[in-house]
Amino acid sequence: MADQGGSNHGIARTSRTRTEEQRQKDLERIKDYRALEDQVRDHAAKNDYSPDVFALTSKLLRLNPEYYTVWNIRRRCLISGLLSKPSPGSSPSKALPTSSPTATTTTSSAGFSSSLSTETPPAPESQTTGKSGTTAEEDEEQKQQNDQQVLQKELHFTIPLLLESPKCYWIWSYRLWILKQVIERLPVPVARQIWEEELGLTSKMLLRDQRNFHAWGYRRHVVEQLESPELEGKSLVESEFEFTTKKIEQNLSNFSAWHSRSKLIPRLLDERNADDEARKAFFEEELHKIGEAINVGPDDQSLWYYHQFLMLNLVNSVEHPTIAPAFTQEERVTYLRREIESIQELLEDYDDAKLIYEALFDYTLYLCQLQERKPNEQEEKDLKGWLGSLKKLDPMRSGRWADLERDFGLRK
């Protein structure tokens, strides 16, 4: 369907016309796609999850990675034959304590070549397991080697799909399922290396798109697993905090990096065993960092999000993570007043920046909340003036501004 004008993220759309030849080619592709879809669904309806059906899902998912039903069929193909059947009571993480991660095949994040193997992973039955004279331990080792091969090929399979559709939920979800199989089926050293490579993959994905919130959320999950007892993990909070610093320095508008930073801080300070002085110094450093960023980009909502996070540490330490719980009431008021005054100075150069007025409005009310009082005469005048500016700058939200006027008794 041709684009119908308008714009997307500041890029003007252009109308496209198709020739009859192009239209016929499109119809042929649609016909082939539907035939392939019918094949997969017919096999699934018959509970046929053979390697041939597995190969058909590969073709279909390359055409449409958003097709979550086909991802589920692919899972069934794996657990119905391509992966080994777990032995009763077996524990892969303990089965082969001497297994070395250096014995792994090419890893899941070793490059982004789209020329990855497309062959169907061999079924367990095709492996030379269970031969006469082999021990149970040898059979178990052979199963794990097969599973490792299959699971790593699956991780490879999704990489080109992620490159084409980096915000497709179903690809990320499937990778997580594969990685859970890694934990359940492989020895800890091998499983841990694969998960560490997955962390490297998220770093590469975030180089391509620093604000991909799917990749950021996925990264947090990977870190959580790497820290877990299942993978004999230890805290990664310091390295992850440094990662957010790096991403913010590369792009101040990276909302996801600021968000992750805010989530890491309480734990970071706890693990550092930071005393009151260290916490105060940390708070002031973060306040200085975000203040400089706002001076550069006062229209950037991601910066104000993080600034508000710091301010809420002063006002409401019960509902929000506390950076410096030992601050006195006087210190909290001083910080808030200083920030309000600093933000007011921004209006001299940016009197059309809507977010400045919103921050001034919110923080003045925070100050009143902190001191358990109503706005004084000057503050009430300022609040009315800032709301007036917001009405002019953002008339589409006139209902919200009217509600604020009513709720705080600011009607003229």
Image (cartoon, rainbow, N blue to C red):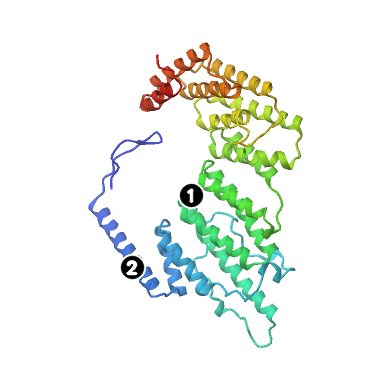
- At label 2, which amino acid type do we have? Asp
Q: Position of residue 13 (x, y in %)?
A: 33, 38
Position of 101 with respect to 295 (left or right) is right
Q: Secondary structure at mark 1?
A: loop
- Which residue is drawn at the image coordinates 63% and 50% (left, top)? 223
Compared across the picture, whether 6 is left or right of 247 comes to left
Q: In the depicted view, which residue is nearer to us: 112 or 134?
A: 134
Q: Which residue is mark 1?
A: 166
Q: Residue reaching furthest left?
A: 20
Residue in the foreground of this view, choosing between 219 and 343: 343
Residue 120 in sight:
no
Up the image or down, 192 lies above or below 141; here it is above
Task: Locate residue 100, reporting x and y percent.
Answer: 72, 65
Q: CA distance from mark 2 to mark 1?
A: 27 Å
Does label 2 or label 1 sit earlier along the sequence? 2
Classed neighbour count for the residue bearing mark 1: other residues with Cα under 10 Å, few (<14), some (14–19), many (≥20): many
**Where is residue 242 shown, x and y percent of the image?**
67, 40
Q: Which residue is mark 2?
A: 38
Where in the figure is residue 96, as x and y percent of width and height? 71, 70
Amino acid type, mark 1: Pro
